Amino acid sequence: MACAAALAILAGWWLVDGQTPADAPAAVVATSAATGPGAVGPAAQPTGDVRPAPDAMLNPSLILIFESALAEAQATGKAAFMAMAPGLLAKRLPAELIARAMGLLERYIDMQESMQALPPPDAGDPASLRKTIEARAEVRRRYFAPEEIEGLFGDEIRQDTLMADKMALARDANLTPEEREAAAKRSEEALLTPEQREQRRAFTAQVDVQRQTDAMNARGTSAQERFAERSAAYGYEAARQLAALDQENQDWNNRLDQYANAPPEQQDQLRESLFNERERLRLAGALALRGSRATPSGQIPSPSAAGQTPGRSPS
């Protein structure tokens, strides 16, 4: 489920603050540029007989904007939040969309309150997960029209359904591994668009790279061995890029060491000289997370969490 949630977030988080990250894929940058800062981009086109969203506003990115506004407000109740909502939405949406967004937002809050009353699914039980999916669908139908459900929540629904399918396949002892893989592929093709399937493959590849890197860190693998292993798994060019990322992460951790070990009276100066503006914004969090994850002496820190150079990923 974490993977599915992560993919849903990756599909549109940069639209929350109206900015496109520097390392976003080219297709994403093009979409963001076309819609403009703060705009809600066009919904992904579903496959099969599911109807596409009828207009651009009915898009999963709008839910991310709602959640961002809720997090910023930290209001203690619905009335207090709704009084703040127009100003919060104005920072995230064009003025002509605010009135309509307010109506959708109020229904979204009511729906979420109803969702909280639903019991969670039993862990690892696909039948229980399907029951929860249907219960959530019934709640959505009380607050939103079919085209609104498809546009705002369609991707989430399909990801949940795909997860339930894969859980059921994993528990089916009558299937061979080959049959299980083929059935999972059919389910994925039926539920996800080609773009969503590519996102899943890219995410899986990134997880695999991270696992390999963590294993090499634990073994204290040399730079030469790392390059050979990565070349065999991903090709020469990917191995070269990952080696460069290793070096950046090593540099980042060296600077963190220098800053953290300096006397307090020198840290303000080092903060300005060692880190750029974006790195300074993440410095406190990186040091706090780093302190909770001891890195064995002599090893190159993992590119994940505090050991990762800000703005980069191991993909």
Image (cartoon, rainbow, N blue to C red):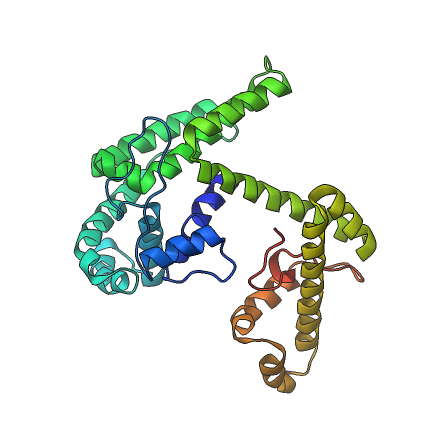
Q: Count all numbered tags in the image, as a single digit.
A: 0
Q: Is residue 239 left or right of residue 11?
A: right
Q: Position of residue 13 (x, y in %)?
A: 41, 54
**Relative to 173, is 2 above or below?**
below
Q: Hey, which residue is sitting farthest top in the picture?
A: 174
Does residue 173 sit above or below 102 in this rendering? above
Q: Is residue 177 above or below residue 232?
A: above
Residue 181, how many percent across, how many down?
A: 58, 24
- Judge whether residue 125 can be spotted in this image: no
Horizontal side of 236 relative to 111 (left or right) equals right
The residue lying at 63 percent from left, 78 percent from top is 274
Drawn side of residue 227 relative to residue 92, left or right: right
Q: Position of residue 270 (x, y in %)?
A: 63, 82
| Residue 109 x %, y % | 26, 48
Q: Does residue 106 appear in this view? A: yes
User: In the rendered image, which quarter is residue 68 located in?
Assistant: bottom left
The answer to whether 246 appears left or right of 170 in the picture is: right
Residue situated in front as seen by the camera: 17 or 229: 229
Q: Viewer-proximal residue, 231 or 82?
A: 231
The residue under the point 58% across, 21% down is 180
Relative to 102, residue 174 above or below: above
Residue in the picture at 63% in, 60% down: 308
